[in-house]
Image: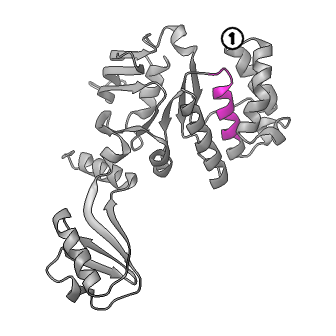
Amino acid sequence: MSDAAVLSVRDLRKVYKKPFEKGGIAALDGVSLEVGRGTIFGLLGPNGAGKTTLVKVLLGLVRGHTGEARLFGLEPLDPRSRERVGYLPEAHRLPGHLTGRQLLRLFGRLSGRAPADVDSRVGALLERVGMEKAADRKVREYSKGMQQRIGLAQALVHSPDLVFLDEPTDGVDPVGRAQIRELVLELKRSGVTLFLNSHLLLEVELMCDRVVIMDKGRILREGTIADLTPATGVVRFEIGAPRADLDRVLAGVGANLRVDGATFQLAIGPAELDSAIDRLRAAGVSIRAVEPRRLNLEEAFLDLVRASNSGSPR
C-alpha cells in the first residue's frame, strides 16, 4: 500500500459456497486496486459483479476471503480501521421512530464523538443536505429521497476521512442530485476520500477522478474518465445553415457522412480535418463548432460488459 493510498486490495478473492455442491460462486476473483487520498473513486458493474462484496470485505462485514485488504494500512477486522470511515449503504434501514435530528445525534454518539462535538455538527449537516426544515419530523414520514439525504448526513456526522457511498442519489430528484453532487465535490476539496458505487453513470462521469469497471468478480478496466471514454474517430460539425450539397463539398474526405439539419458527423482522421475545414470555408459554409466525439461512460461501460459476457473482454 502506497503512502498516498487510504484503501488498497491485492489479489482479493471471495467464494460463496453452495450447500452440497463443489466449488461455489466467485464473487471476487483476484481484485487489486488502490484509492488515493482526497479523490473520488467510482466502482461500476452490473448486478452480481462483486461490488457490494468488495465494499463489505473492506468494512469487515464479509469474512473468509483470501488476498490482502487494507483501510488506512489496517486490516478490515481491526476496529480502528473503521473509526475514520463513513458509510451510506444501498437500501439502508434507519430507525423510523426517531426524528432526523435525533438520528444524527444517535449515529454521532455511536461513532464515539463527544455529545457537544456531535451537536455542533448536526445543524450544519442538516442544512448541507437540505433537510433542516424536516429535521424534527419522524424518519418514517420521509420520502425515499429524504431518507437518502438524511442517510448521507449520518455517514458524515463524525467527520470521516473516507466515505463509502452506495447509490447515494437513488430516489433523489434532479435538484437533490445536484446538491448531493456539490456536497461530494466539496468533501473532496476538503481532503476527504470518497468511494462511490452508482448505477447513474452520468453522476459518476461528472464526479469521479478514477473509475473501476467490474464484472463477474474481476476488474475489466480501470482509469480516469478520459482513459475510459476514448475518441471514436468521428467529428461533429455545426454549421450556420443546412446545406444540401455537403456530400459534394466533402467528396473524398473522411467517410460515413451523416447530416442532420445544420449539423453533420464525419468519420475523419486528424490529417484530413484541416482539409475538410478548408473545403467548407471555400464553399462559403459558416462553421460554428467542430467537436471530436468521444464515447460517454455509459457507452464504454456497455461495450466492456458485453465483451466480457461474450467471452472476449477487451
64 shown above or below 237: above
Magenta highlight range: 147-159
Residue 162 location in percent, x, y? Answer: 53, 24
In the image as oriented, which residue stretches furthest toward the right?
A: 136
In the image as oriented, which residue stretches furthest toward the left?
A: 252
Residue 132 location in percent, x, y? Answer: 80, 38
Residue bearing mark 1: 112
Query: SS at mark 1?
Result: loop
Residue positioned 45% across, 48% down in the render:
205
Residue positioned 66% across, 15% down in the render:
111
Q: Is residue 55 left or right of residue 257?
A: right
Q: Quadrant of the N terminus?
A: top left
Residue 18 location in percent, x, y? Answer: 36, 26
Magenta span includes 14: no
Q: In this view of the protein, can residue 93 be seen by the observer?
A: no
Camera-side residue of 282 and 65? 282
